[in-house]
Amino acid sequence: MQITPELVKYLESLARITLSEDEEKKVGAELGDILAYIDMLNELDTEGVEAMSHCFPLTNVMREDEVAPSMSPDEITANAPESSDGSFVVPKTVE
């Protein structure tokens, strides 16, 4: 992909920034270098390389989700200063 001055100006408008002409030339050159590096990476042979999300062999360490006995709404609200129909009653904060 060719980095043109028009593309740099378009990216400026997307980023909502203003660059001087010198900065535009510098940014254009840097973007060209970045894209050239990415093209170089695309040339690598990744045949047989396993895709990873981490560099360490992590596995899910969370416990299984199991249904367990719980408290009833009446037990939960038993110590509340005020409750109604199994819910906490709190002071109104928004008019």
Image (cartoon, helix red, strand yellow):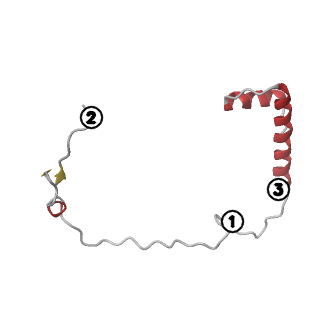
Q: Amino acid at mark 2?
A: Val
Q: Could you tell me which residue is drawn at 82 percent across and 46 percent down? A: 34
| Residue, disc 3 | 41
Dot 3 and dot 2 residues touching (CB under 8 Å): no
* Quarter of the image where one finds residue 71: bottom left
**Local SS, label 1:** loop
Horizontal side of 42 relative to 56 (left or right) equals: right
Which quadrant: the C terminus? top left
Q: Nearer the viewer, residue 70 or 78?
A: 78
Which quadrant: the N terminus? top right
> Number of marks in the image?
3
Q: Residues within 10 Å of mark 3 (few under 14, many from 20)?
A: few
- The answer for how far apart the CA atoms under marks 2 and 1 are is 51 Å
| Residue, disc 2 | 94
| Pointer 3 or 1: first along the chain | 3
Residue 30 position in % (x across, y down)? 84, 41
Q: Amino acid at mark 1?
A: Ala
Q: Could you tell me which residue is drawn at 19 percent across and 61 percent down? A: 76
Dot 3 and dot 1 residues touching (CB under 8 Å): no
Residue 23 position in % (x across, y down)? 82, 31
* Quarter of the image where one finds residue 27: top right
Q: Nearer the viewer, residue 33 or 26?
A: 26
- The answer for how far apart the CA atoms under marks 3 and 2 are is 56 Å
| Residue, disc 1 | 51
Horizontal side of 47 relative to 14 (left or right) equals: right
Q: Nearer the viewer, mark 2 or mark 1?
A: 2
Q: Could you tell me which residue is drawn at 65 percent across and 71 percent down? A: 56
| Pointer 3 or 2: first along the chain | 3
Q: Which mark is residue 71?
A: none
Residue 22 position in % (x across, y down)? 86, 29
